[in-house]
Amino acid sequence: MRLVRWAARTAGAVLFGFHAWLFVSQWADGRLQTDPALLLRWAAALGLAGALIWLGREGTSLVSRQAVVIWLLAALLHGPAVSAKSADLQTLPETAASLLIQTTAAAGVLGVALWALWLIAGLLRRRAESNTAWPIVHALRGLGFINDGFSTVVSARPPPANS
């Protein structure tokens, strides 16, 4: 476990060092003074880094639902930087945004479907546990297929003999 923590902290330090070097080089080139969008992206990056640090200190896993949202926002934040390096990828931010929307929609549909299946399985299990004698009769009675005069009472043993 200590090795994993050490590796994570080393990777975080390398990542921080690279971004500090990148920020200083962009500042020295004068790109931050001439490009306000770049300055806003750095401000958003500081906000995302602060949010990740806050989640980590709160004890939340860095692969939790909240952290995944932050990681996805950081990935979208890097889109313009990647597309600026390649002439073929000028539509990368739009592609990343549409991919994010499609992935979120698919995950939502899958989540709702799994939740519905879990709910149905739980209801069927509860019904089977409570009505072990004739669960199908109780299910059909609930749907209205059996007359109200029909009794679903089942005795586990015969009535006592009168002597």
Image (spheres, rainbow, N blue to C red):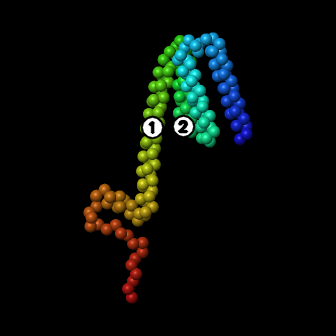
Tell me the number on the disc at residue 136: none
Residue 83 location, quadrant: top right
At 46% from the left edge and 41% from the top edge, which residue is drawn? 111
User: Is any atom of residue 62 visible in this view?
Assistant: no
Q: Are marks 2 and 1 in contact (CB under 8 Å)?
A: no
**Residue 3 at what x, y percent from top left?**
73, 37
Q: Tell me the quarter of the image containing the N terminus.
A: top right
User: Is any atom of residue 72 visible in this view?
Assistant: yes
Which element carries disc 2, helix, strand or loop? helix
Tell me the number on the disc at residue 66: 2
**Residue 134 at what x, y percent from top left?**
38, 63
Residue at the extreme bottom of the image, as rendered: 163
Question: Front-most of 101 and 124?
Answer: 101
Q: According to the image, label 1 marks what residue?
A: 108
**Residue 90 at what x, y percent from top left?**
50, 15
At 58% from the left edge and 15% from the top edge, which residue is drawn? 32
Q: Amino acid at mark 2?
A: Gln
Question: Front-most of 79 and 122?
Answer: 79
Mark 2 vs mark 1, foreground winner is: 2
Question: Front-most of 86 and 29?
Answer: 29
At 36% from the left edge and 69% from the top edge, which residue is drawn? 153
At 54% from the left edge and 14% from the top edge, which residue is drawn? 35
